[in-house]
Amino acid sequence: MFPQVTQLQIKTKEKESGLPKIGKSFLFDFKKGDFDVKDGRVVEVTGKAAIKGWIEKILRTEKYRYKIYEREDSNEYGIIIEDLIIGNNFPKAFVEAELRREITESLTKHPMIGSISQWEIKKDNPQLIVSFQVDLVGGDFLSQEVNL
């Protein structure tokens, strides 16, 4: 009685080159504390540069400090570092293990980050220097160093 309608197959462009699609990112100069602007426009970044900027933002944001990042699920933004290294005298092995766990949990939420490896943690009073490799989905990697 009703006409038969052909089933349409709609393909969404979710992945490009077999990798998850992510939103736009803009180049931020952490030394100036502002976005980079060229010809009156904010500079857009893609690929590794976008991921590197995202990592830097995560590592510079103390979790639970800013209301704008509060969430009721497991996708909180930022990492907890200050409680580990400021005003506490935790054993070195504990601090290193917690730093690795906290950074790994936060960074691997990104769809392009597969794992974190090749950790190196050095104490250079009063700073703590943390270096690691970010293994990306698709086999590529980034090297990252953080001064805490």
Image (cartoon, rainbow, N blue to C red):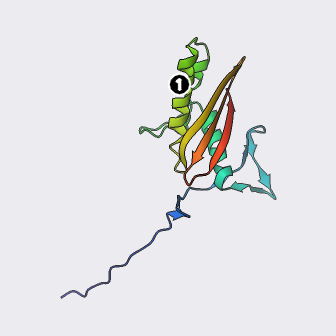
Q: Amino acid at mark 1?
A: Ala
Q: Secondary structure at mark 1?
A: helix
Q: State the quadrant of the C terminus.
A: top right
Residue lying furthest left:
1
Where does the image place residue 83, in percent across and percent down from the top left?
A: 56, 20
Can the viewer see residue 114?
A: yes
Quadrant in the picture for residue 31: top right
Residue on which the image places disc 1: 97
For the residue pair 93 and 147, the one nearer the viewer reads as 93
Quadrant in the picture for residue 122: top right
Above or below, 49 relative to 99: below
Where does the image place residue 8, in percent across and percent down from the top left?
A: 37, 78
Above or below, 94 relative to 29: above
Q: State the quadrant of the N terminus.
A: bottom left
Where does the image place residue 95, in percent across and percent down from the top left?
A: 56, 20
Quadrant in the picture for residue 127: top right
Above or below, 48 relative to 13: above
Question: Looking at the image, how many numbered discs can be counted on the residues?
Answer: 1
Q: Residues within 10 Å of mark 1 (few under 14, many from 20)?
A: few
Residue at horizontal 47 percent and vertical 40 percent from the top: 75
Residue lying furthest right:
39
Where does the image place residue 11, in percent across and percent down from the top left?
A: 45, 72
Can the viewer see residue 64?
A: no
Residue at horizontal 54 percent and vertical 52 percent from the top: 137
For the residue pair 135 and 99, the one nearer the viewer reads as 135
Judge left or right: residue 5 versus residue 1: right
Residue lying furthest top:
89
